[in-house]
Amino acid sequence: MKDISSTQNVEKVFMDGKPVDRSFHPNYRNPIPRPLSDRFVTSVSQLSPASIVEGSAGQIKLTGANFRPSHRVLLNGKKVESRFINGRELEVQIPPTRVGTHRITLIDPGVASSESNAVYLVVSFK
């Protein structure tokens, strides 16, 4: 091919021996993902309350930026129940938990490698 303009004369495209539809598709996704640096970064700035008592289940509120309804909350890497309030707040249902410092992060299952920064919940003795 001496000139790229000859690509404009392509009438049919075949892949694996089958013709490929070249028309517009509203659900098309680019197979080459864009870098994550151009997306909004989810960050958690605080949790309230920051500590609970051993063995008690409770509700905490996460505050931060760029929260979405698709986010899932992980407590030590395991999914826990949560409720989206708005782009800056999530409510999280904490199951009865042992004494210690527990890592809480948010993930978005729709975006590869999109885990937020971690905040820590302290569980103290009764």
Image (cartoon, helix red, strand yellow):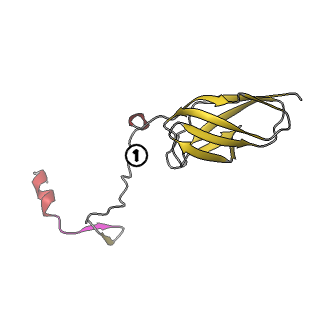
Judging by the rendered image, the residue that carries numbered circle 1 is 33
53 vs 43, nearest the viewer: 53
Residue at point 11% right, 58% down? Answer: 6
Residue at point 70% right, 30% down? Answer: 49
4 vs 28, nearest the viewer: 28
Residue extending farthest bottom = 18
Q: In the picture, residue 53 is in which quadrant?
A: top right
Task: Please provide percent x and percent y for residue 7.
Answer: 15, 58
Residue at point 49% right, 46% down? Answer: 111
Q: Quadrant of the C terminus?
A: top right
Q: What stretch of residues is rendered in magenta?
A: 10-15
Q: Amino acid at mark 1?
A: Pro
Task: Please provide percent x and percent y for residue 94.
Answer: 74, 41
Instruction: Please tell me how many numbered marks the rendered image carries.
Output: 1
**What SS does tag 1 mark?**
loop
Q: Crowdedness of circle 1 by 10 Å Cα count: few (<14), some, many (20+)?
A: few
Left or right for 12, reference 97: left
Task: Please provide percent x and percent y for residue 15.
Answer: 33, 66
Residue at point 38% right, 36% down? Answer: 38
Vertical arrangement, residue 78 with respect to residue 122, above or below: below
12 vs 92, nearest the viewer: 92
Left or right for 113, reference 14: right
Q: Quadrant of the N terminus?
A: bottom left
Vertical arrangement, residue 14 with respect to residue 61, above or below: below
